[in-house]
């Protein structure tokens, strides 16, 4: 069951340790895409913070992007002095986050990842992010995401 999932427990602990205000919500169906999550939550797709892991020359990079955006990887890499950003393979994602694609949370990883947060998310009073499992999300804010992840604001498009 999702409630006793160890990955969700790690995310919950990271949220509590970070003083996050939102609680983890279990969804009846898996929300593997921003559109799925928005439909389940009754919010705009732009208010969904997708946790995307990229491989930058063997180093993981987490980009939290609005569900309304696609990441211009060349732009982000050039503006931040990164090696080319390539969409990470599932085993790379799991080894660096401890989580599977479709439920990767912005927190609860074995080590802190270099993180960028899409400025577009600041348009929303409430932002929703995955909580370590495709059936779980938590509510947060743009400012809280920056604080919890140590992320850098970025324009992803």
Image (cartoon, helix red, strand yellow):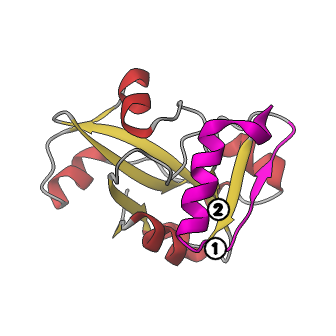
- Taking the image as shown, residue 66 lies to the left or right of residue 2, namely left
Badge 1 element = loop
- Residue 110 visible in this rendered orientation of the protein: yes
* Residue 74 on image: x %, y %: 23, 46
Image height of 140 relative to 63, above or below:
below
> In the rendered picture of this protein, how many numbered marks are placed on residues?
2
Residue at 81% of width from left, 54% of height from top? Answer: 41
Query: Which quadrant of the rendered structure holds the C terminus?
Result: bottom left
Is 23 magenta? The answer is yes
Q: Which residues are magenta?
A: 1-28
* Residue 109 on image: x %, y %: 44, 46
* Residue 54 on image: x %, y %: 33, 39
- Residue 133 visible in this rendered orientation of the protein: no
Report the Cα–Cα distance between label 2 and label 1.
Answer: 6 Å
Residue at 54% of width from left, 41% of height from top? Answer: 104
Badge 2 element = helix
> Viewer-proximal residue, 42 or 2?
2
> Which of pointers 2 and 1 lies earlier in the amino acid sequence?
2
Residue at 53% of width from left, 31% of height from top? Answer: 101
Is 137 magenta? The answer is no
Label annotation for residue 47: 2
Q: Which residue extends farthest right?
A: 28
Pointer 1: what residue? 124
Circle 2 residues within 10 Å: few <14, some 14–19, many ≥20: many
């Amino acid at each position: 069951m999702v409630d006793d999932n160890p990955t969700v427990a790690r995310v919950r602990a990271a949220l509590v340790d970070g003083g996050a205000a939102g609680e983890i919500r279990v969804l009846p169906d898996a929300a593997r895409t921003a559109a799925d999550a928005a439909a389940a939550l009754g919010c705009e797709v732009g208010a969904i913070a997708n946790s995307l892991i990229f491989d930058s020359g063997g180093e993981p990079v987490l980009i939290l992007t609005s569900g309304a955006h696609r990441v211009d990887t060349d732009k982000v890499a050039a503006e931040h002095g990164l090696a080319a950003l390539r969409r990470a393979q599932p085993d790379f994602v799991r080894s660096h986050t401890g989580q599977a694609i479709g439920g990767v949370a912005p927190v609860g990883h074995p080590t802190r990842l270099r993180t960028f947060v899409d400025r577009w998310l600041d348009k929303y009073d409430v932002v929703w992010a995955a909580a370590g499992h495709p059936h779980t999300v938590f509510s947060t804010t743009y400012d809280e995401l920056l604080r919890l992840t140590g992320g850098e604001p970025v324009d992803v498009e």
